[in-house]
Structure formats: structure tokens, C-alpha cells
């Protein structure tokens, strides 16, 4: 059986550009959920999100004519490829799987809003060419010279982790020796308005696992990981960060926006990850939770974790309490954080956790990062429509 | 990809709604045997002011008797098309609730280019007309492209992984290739896979304004792949899905095996968004990988369904890739795009057509081809189906540089 390791990381997050900024912000417990500046929010219940800072976005090296999301994707993939030390020859055979939801919608909205108001600027029509999610993969593949299998996955809030699951399958099946896998999303009006309309946004920064939690917060960004067959990585003297042991995927087939109350779908995804990875439940030392801060998600995820892992003392934390729910980027940013937890043996905290929910029987690492000995960690992502992905990573001991 | 060490993958069901007709495997076969192109001037929307008028449009009543009333009220049209096609495929496969057996479950893999963009427009319009109070909250989930996969999973009780792939032109082919790999490697017990797209007014006008439809650069409008007069593609709509199962399990439950998918490979010649690769980009590697999985020599491929859209640069690139893979060997070539129009469902229709050809040894003609751009290819010219033997290829290329190759074979030619 081919083993798959992580040999490169790249990120654009609400902390700025780069993995170093992401990891520093997460471990410092710095919440960057603030009033939205990208577009008008007048009249909405919640008016906050975690945006990529304007200075960082402006400094991205890609052409400003590209969509914001395309520029995030380019910056994160460039960093991952550089971090992994991939030569042009390696890149020519590399696969690319991008998780995406909004595509270039932010720019298309600007065109459509003007059209609706009778003030269309025909030059803005060019935004339509990068409207669809597959635009990111095409931009990245061309700029980085990636010539292996290329896919764009749209799996709602599980879009960022599913590429890692299917990317690892490509490697194990022998379709590519290495795959650049991750997700990207920029904030859009449609997304912001939709979650507001569903009353799923907290007017204040979200409070996952808190008994007074009132919903989620939005965010944006991109993250990509270089996945590689272990033999291939060792042959070129690459240094693995961690091993991607396995992934479980399932669908609730229950409801479009609500998780299944008995957590059956989540349980099947987590259990499949354990079975495929040959890992006992007791070996999992940390879970980077989906942890959105909605009442239903956190309760259901806790139920699934209890049934699958069964340990009340398990370390569980939510990156979303710090950087919001970055949609299609979330699963990938959280995978990066999980890999760095294994490398540095540090668990990032859950912010705003002042009143732990007694129905969530885990150590959710409130406020302050924690040093911990973690050999195996799980990262969960659950999307609208009941799309569930659980990833299992193992610490790499050189 | 499908490794020879993995499970063999059978096509056991077909469900299709396209301009060519509605039904399962038999209905698709009848439409291909008749060979009548279904491209015609659009009826459902005004095309004044656009440079294009043709489409492979579904009849207005296409969903009658195919959706239950509650779904007709609750689901958008593109979701209803997907659910209906998947139910037809399950019926064609004589699939019932006990068929899936133990394991990860039935999955749904949907390829689409545009998703439910119509609902996204409706959602935005709600805000633009009435502000936050006008937002139709219940259609917000439709603004995410996975809506067809998840509504279908709910409708048919599919609890295995559901995946949505976004891709121009070859989304359906790619979805079926990915699905075949997931059945082969055991990530799925069985899977409904294919493609879906719809035509609606803003989308059609947008595509026409972006000059991606025939007539690109003048001449008479029409879809004429590989013909000297080609000048762009014509848009179609619909949903075509196949049911894929592990061959041994399908045989155990007594299913009819329409064909076997023995190779599935996809690759990329980076070209950038909306751009076709340059002549000479790419090689025969993707097709060779699919043949290698199938353990077939290139000479074993007797026929091929190509994406052949009528877009001159894509068509030329596709022919270059075939030449690189097949050398002097010349499989008989056809394309369904002139019959049903370019849409993600066409990838499903290509695979369904290939399964029909594998079983009947009949290949539909490329009736729009009068004067081939290249003489040294064996196109299926004329107006009658051709005899076609052995295994075949489903092949597609897209702007952006994606290439998909699937090897489809009749069961009797498979290795034991």
C-alpha cells in the first residue's frame, strides 16, 4: 500500500499571506473577525467576518485583474510548491485538486449589481470569464505548470478537505506521484446574504462549543498541501511534515441545511477514516473540529466524536473561532493547522469559549494554545447537504 | 484511474433526459439508431439581440411524470433533471434498496459546468429588488453547485460519498471517470455518475455575448465538428447518468451488464482559463494510461466517441491527441455534440452511447460532417450507423486543457 505524506504547505488567511502568519495567529489565539469592509452590509443582522487584510491582498503578486479568489489560490499554491521544493519536472507530473464554492462571484456580483441598477460598465463583463469555480484550477495549473490530473470539487463547506481525500486516492491508485490539493474562497455578497437570511450568523464573533453560541462567522482564504507518495518524497530528499493516513467520506442524505440529529453520516465518515488508516480510536489525540458555532453542528459533531472516539478528555478545538468559516478554504486551512499541530505538538485554542457547553464532553482548549503530545490527529469538515469528510494525519518521526 | 489489481466496474443502468429523448438504455439506443440531430431554434426564451439562436433544448413537458409533486414544488429545474435521470438509471438497472449491500454505500458524482446558476440569479434579484427582506432564504443552498448531488442523494437515499465536479465540456465524462475509480478502489459500493446542465435566458445571452457559441467569426450557425465549415459549438441541456457497480456484485444480483469501464484516466495540458491548448501541447499519455489500465493494445480500440464540439481549436487539439496515442491506427470516430448540443450531460450520453455500441456493435454517424478538416482520420460519415467492433474510447477535451479518456468494452471481451 502506497503511503502518502505531506511535503509542502501554503496558505492565505485572515492573518495575511503565508503559513507562518497563519500558524502564529492561530497559536496566539488572535481572533480576526471584524466588521466587513469588502462590500456594504447595511441592514443585515450580522455584519462581521474575517477578511484577508487589505494590505496583504493588495500585495499578492498576481495581476489585480484576476479575481480575488484566483489571487488567493495562486499565492497559496506558489508557497506550497516552493515549500516542497518541487522542480519544474516534478510539477509537470503533479495533479491538482481544488475545492471551491464561490469562484469569481465577488467580481461578477459587482457587474450584476451595476447591471441591475442600469449602470453596467461593459469592461466588468470580463469578470464573467472567471466566475465559475474551475477558473482557479486553470489559473494555477497554467501559472505553475502542473500537468497531471486536474479537478475542481464543489462540496459546500467540505470542499477544502475532500481534495485531500481524493488527491491521496490519485496517488495510491498510481495516477500521479504527487498532488497539490486544497481549497479557496473569497467572501461574496451571495454567501454573506445567504447565511444571514438563514439566521446562521452570530452578530458577534462565533463561539464554538460555548453554551451561549449563536451561530457562525464567515471568513476567506486559501490553503494547499503538497501530497506525495512516500517513496517519491524520500527519493528526492523531501522532508515530510506528516503522513496523511486516511480519509472517510459520507453523505447524510437527510436535509439540505441541517445535520442528521443522530450524527449517522458524521459517524460513518470518522469510522471509515479510522478503519482505512488502521488506527484505534484511542490513538487519536486531537481533533481539529468542524466547530462552526451553530447550535446544531457543534452538538451533532460532539455526539459523533463521543460515539466514535469515546473519550471525554479528548483535545478538540475550532480554528473557526479565530478566522471564521472560510468556506471552501476551511478544510484545507484546518488541515494545515492539524499538520502543524503534529509537527510542533501545539494545539491552537478555541476563542470566546467562556461557558463550555456541558453537552460537549471534551477539552476544547479555551483561549490559550496548549502543548500536548499528539501522534494522530483528525480534521473534520461537514457541508450543506450532509457532505462529511474526516481526515486522519500521523506525526512524522524522521 | 482503475488499477488492474482493483475491482472491475460495470455499467448496469442508464438514465437520460436530453434533446434526443428521455429514458434508459433502450431509449438512448433508439435515439442513436435514428440518428436525428435535435438542434433547433430556441423556443423557451427570446433570443433577439443575440448572435446565436440554436440549442439542443428539452421539451417544456420533459419532467411530467418524472417527478413527484413535492419535489416539483421544492426543487429547482436542474435539480429535478438530475433526480429524474438518476431514478431512470436505477430503474434501468433494476436496482432496489437491497442492491447496495454492505460497504460505503451508493454514491452520487455529478459533473456540471454551470450548476444552478438560475437560482443564484433569483437569489440576488430578491435582494436587489427588496433589500435584505427580499432574500429567499430557502434557495440559498441552490447557489452552491453541490445542490444537484445532495438533493439527488436525499431523493434516492444515497449515503456514500457525493461529489460535484465543475468543468467545461467534459464534466460528465470526468465525473464518470472519477466514479469508476472510486468503485474500483472500494471507496464506493456503487455510484450514480454523469452530468447535468440547463439553458436559461441570462446564461444563453451571456455565452452568446462572450462569443463562445456558433457562429464564432461568421458563417452559418451550427455544430459541425471536424468539418471545414465549423465555427463554434451549440449549447444543449439535460442530464444523463449511469449506474456503475463492481462487476462481480452486479453479476451476483443478476443485473444486465451494458458494458464494462476498463480504463479511466484524465490529465491536463495547462492552457489557462477559457483557452484551448496550443497545437502540439499534450501527448498520447492520457489515452495510453487508460489503455494500460484496460490491458488493451491501441489496435483493440475500434471506435471512439469524441467531445468534438465544433470549436476549431479544441477539435484540432483533440485530433492531435488521438494521433499521438493511436499513430497509424484509425478507430472509427463520432461525436454526439451535433445531435444534442454541448452540456455536461453529454459526457453521460457519450458513455451511455459507448455502452450501446459495445453491446450492439452499432456506432451513430457524424452526420454533420461534409468536408473533414483532416483526411487521415476515419470519421463515421454519412447518415447511417456504422458497424463497430470490440472495445471503444470515450474521449473529451475542454478549454483550460482538461482531457479525459475512458475505455468502454463489451463484457465478453474482458479478461477473466
Image (cartoon, rainbow, N blue to C red):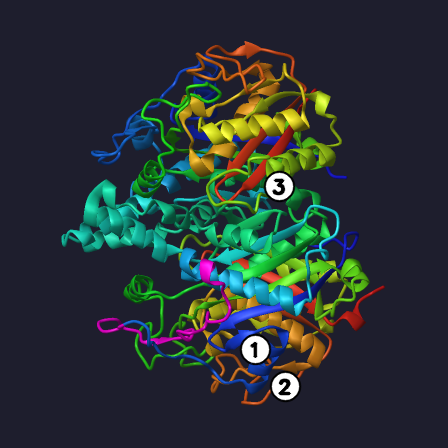
Percent of width and height locating residue B249: 78, 58
Residue B386, numbered label: 2
Judging from the image, what secondary structure is the residue with disc 1 in? strand
Residue at numbered disc 3? A249
Work out whether disc 2 and disc 1 sit on a shared chain. Answer: yes
Quick check: marks 2 and 1 in contact, CB under 8 Å?
yes
Q: Earlier in the sequence, mark 2 or mark 1?
A: 1
Q: Which chain is disc 2 placed on?
A: B
The residue sitting at 74% across, 26% down in the picture is A280
Judging from the image, what secondary structure is the residue with disc 3 in? strand
Task: Using the numbered discs, state the Cα–Cα distance from disc 2 to disc 3 in whole angstroms.
Answer: 43 Å
Residue B38 drawn above or below residue A134 = below
- For this rendering, which residue is in front, A220 or B233? A220
Mark 2: few/some/many CA within 10 Å (<14, 14-19, 20+) = some
| Residue mark closest to the camera, 2 vs 3 | 3
Quick check: marks 3 and 1 in contact, CB under 8 Å?
no
Q: Quadrant location of residue A21?
A: top left
Q: Most prominent secondary structure in the magenta stretch? A: loop
Q: Residue furthest right?
A: B416
Q: Is residue A64 left or right of residue B89?
A: left
Q: Which chain is disc 1 placed on?
A: B
Q: Is residue A348 magenta?
A: no
Percent of width and height locating residue A44: 25, 34
- For this rendering, which residue is in front, A237 or B288? B288
Residue at numbered disc 1? B334
Q: Which chain is disc 3 placed on?
A: A
Percent of width and height locating residue A168: 64, 40
- For this rendering, which residue is in front, B182 or A321? A321
The magenta segment: B46-71
Q: Residue furthest front?
A: B69
Amino acid at each position: 500500500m502506497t503511503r502518502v505524506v505531506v511535503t509542502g504547505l501554503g496558505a492565505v488567511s485572515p492573518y495575511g499571506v503565508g503559513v507562518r502568519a497563519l500558524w502564529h495567529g492561530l497559536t496566539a489565539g488572535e481572533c480576526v473577525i471584524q466588521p466587513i469592509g469588502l462590500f456594504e452590509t447595511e441592514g443585515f443582522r450580522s455584519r462581521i467576518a474575517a477578511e484577508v487584510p487589505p494590505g496583504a491582498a493588495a500585495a499578492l503578486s498576481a495581476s489585480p485583474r484576476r479575481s480575488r479568489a484566483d489571487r488567493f489560490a495562486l499565492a497559496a499554491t506558489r508557497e506550497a510548491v516552493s515549500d516542497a521544493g518541487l522542480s519544474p519536472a516534478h510539477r509537470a507530473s503533479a495533479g491538482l485538486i481544488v475545492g471551491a464554492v464561490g469562484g469569481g462571484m465577488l467580481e461578477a456580483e459587482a457587474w450584476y449589481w451595476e447591471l441591475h441598477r442600469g449602470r453596467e460598465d461593459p469592461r466588468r463583463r470580463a469578470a464573467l470569464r472567471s466566475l465559475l469555480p474551475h477558473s482557479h484550477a486553470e489559473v494555477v495549473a497554467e501559472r505553475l505548470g502542473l500537468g497531471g490530473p486536474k479537478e475542481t470539487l464543489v462540496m459546500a463547506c467540505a470542499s477544502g478537505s475532500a481534495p485531500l481525500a481524493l488527491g491521496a486516492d490519485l496517488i495510491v491508485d498510481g495516477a500521479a506521484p504527487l498532488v497539490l490539493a486544497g481549497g479557496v474562497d473569497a467572501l461574496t455578497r451571495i454567501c454573506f446574504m445567504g447565511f444571514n437570511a438563514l439566521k446562521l450568523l452570530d452578530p458577534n464573533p462565533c463561539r464554538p462549543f460555548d453554551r451561549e453560541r449563536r451561530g457562525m462567522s464567515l471568513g476567506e482564504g486559501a490553503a494547499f498541501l503538497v501530497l506525495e507518495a512516500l517513496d517519491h518524497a524520500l527519493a528526492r530528499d523531501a522532508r515530510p511534515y506528516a503522513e496523511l493516513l486516511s480519509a472517510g467520506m459520507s453523505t447524510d442524505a437527510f436535509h439540505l441545511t441541517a445535520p442528521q440529529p443522530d450524527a449517522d453520516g458524521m459517524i460513518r465518515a470518522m469510522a471509515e477514516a479510522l478503519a482505512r488508516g488502521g488506527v484505534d480510536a484511542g490513538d487519536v489525540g486531537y481533533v481539529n473540529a468542524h466547530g462552526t458555532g451553530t447550535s446544531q453542528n457543534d452538538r451533532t459533531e460532539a455526539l459523533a466524536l463521543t460515539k466514535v472516539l469515546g473519550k471525554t478528555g479528548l483535545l478538540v478545538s475550532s480554528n473557526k473561532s479565530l478566522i471564521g468559516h472560510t468556506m471552501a478554504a476551511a478544510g484545507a486551512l484546518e488541515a494545515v493547522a492539524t499538520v502543524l499541530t503534529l509537527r510542533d505538538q501545539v494545539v491552537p485554542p478555541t476563542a470566546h469559549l467562556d461557558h463550555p457547553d456541558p453537552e460537549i464532553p471534551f477539552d476544547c482548549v479555551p483561549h490559550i494554545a496548549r502543548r500536548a503530545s499528539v501522534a494522530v490527529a483528525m480534521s473534520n469538515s461537514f457541508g450543506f447537504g450532509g457532505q462529511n469528510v474526516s481526515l486522519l494525519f500521523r506525526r512524522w518521526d524522521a | 484511474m482503475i488499477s488492474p489489481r482493483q475491482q472491475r466496474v460495470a455499467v448496469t443502468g442508464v438514465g437520460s433526459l436530453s434533446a434526443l429523448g428521455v429514458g434508459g438504455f433502450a431509449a438512448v439506443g433508439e435515439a442513436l439508431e435514428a440518428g436525428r440531430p435535435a438542434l433547433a431554434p430556441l423556443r423557451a426564451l427570446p433570443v433577439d439581440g443575440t448572435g446565436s439562436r440554436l440549442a439542443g433544448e428539452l421539451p417544456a413537458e420533459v419532467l411530467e411524470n418524472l417527478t413527484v409533486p413535492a419535489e416539483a414544488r421544492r426543487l429547482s429545474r436542474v435539480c429535478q433533471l438530475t433526480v429524474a435521470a438518476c431514478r431512470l438509471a436505477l430503474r434501468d438497472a433494476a436496482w432496489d434498496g437491497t442492491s447496495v449491500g454492505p460497504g460505503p454505500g451508493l454514491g452520487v458524482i455529478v459533473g456540471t459546468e454551470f450548476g444552478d446558476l438560475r437560482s443564484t440569479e433569483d437569489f440576488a434579484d430578491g435582494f436587489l429588488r427588496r433589500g435584505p427582506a427580499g432574500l429567499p432564504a430557502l434557495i440559498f443552498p441552490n447557489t452552491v453547485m453541490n445542490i444537484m448531488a445532495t438533493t439527488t442523494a436525499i431523493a434516492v437515499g444515497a449515503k456514500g460519498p457525493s461529489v460535484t465536479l465543475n468543468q467545461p465540456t467534459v464534466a460528465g465524462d470526468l465525473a464518470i471517470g472519477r466514479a469508476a475509480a472510486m468503485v474500483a478502489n472500494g471507496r464506493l459500493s456503487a455510484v450514480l455518475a454523469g452530468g447535468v446542465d440547463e439553458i436559461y435566458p441570462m446564461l444563453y445571452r451571456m455565452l452568446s455575448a462572450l462569443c463562445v457559441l456558433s457562429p464564432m467569426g461568421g458563417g452559418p450557425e451550427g455544430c459541425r465538428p471536424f468539418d471545414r465549415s465549423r465555427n463554434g459549438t451549440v449549447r444543449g441541456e439535460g442530464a444523463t447518468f449511469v449506474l456503475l457497480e463492481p462487476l462481480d456484485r452486479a453479476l451476483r444480483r443478476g443485473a444486465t451488464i451494458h458494458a464494462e469501464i476498463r480504463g479511466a484516466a484524465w490529465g491536463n495540458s495547462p492552457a489557462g482559463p477559457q483557452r484551448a491548448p496550443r497545437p502540439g501541447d499534450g501527448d498520447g499519455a492520457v489515452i495510453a494510461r487508460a489503455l494500460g489500465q484496460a490491458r488493451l493494445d491501441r489496435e483493440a480500440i475500434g471506435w471512439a466517441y469524441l467531445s468534438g464540439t465544433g470549436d476549431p481549436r479544441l477539435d484540432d487539439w483533440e485530433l492531435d491527441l488521438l494521433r499521438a496515442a493511436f499513430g497509424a491506427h484509425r478507430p472509427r470516430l463520432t461525436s454526439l455534440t451535433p445531435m444534442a448540443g454541448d452540456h455536461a450531460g453529454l459526457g453521460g450520453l457519450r458513455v451511455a452511447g459507448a455502452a450501446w455500441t459495445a453491446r450492439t456493435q452499432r456506432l451513430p454517424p457524424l452526420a454533420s460532417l461534409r468536408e473533414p478538416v483532416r483526411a487521415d482520420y476515419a470519421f463515421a460519415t454519412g447518415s447511417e450507423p456504422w458497424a463497430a467492433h470490440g472495445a471503444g474510447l470515450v474521449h473529451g477535451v475542454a478549454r483550460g486543457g482538461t482531457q479525459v479518456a475512458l475505455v468502454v468494452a463489451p463484457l465478453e471481451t474482458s479478461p477473466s
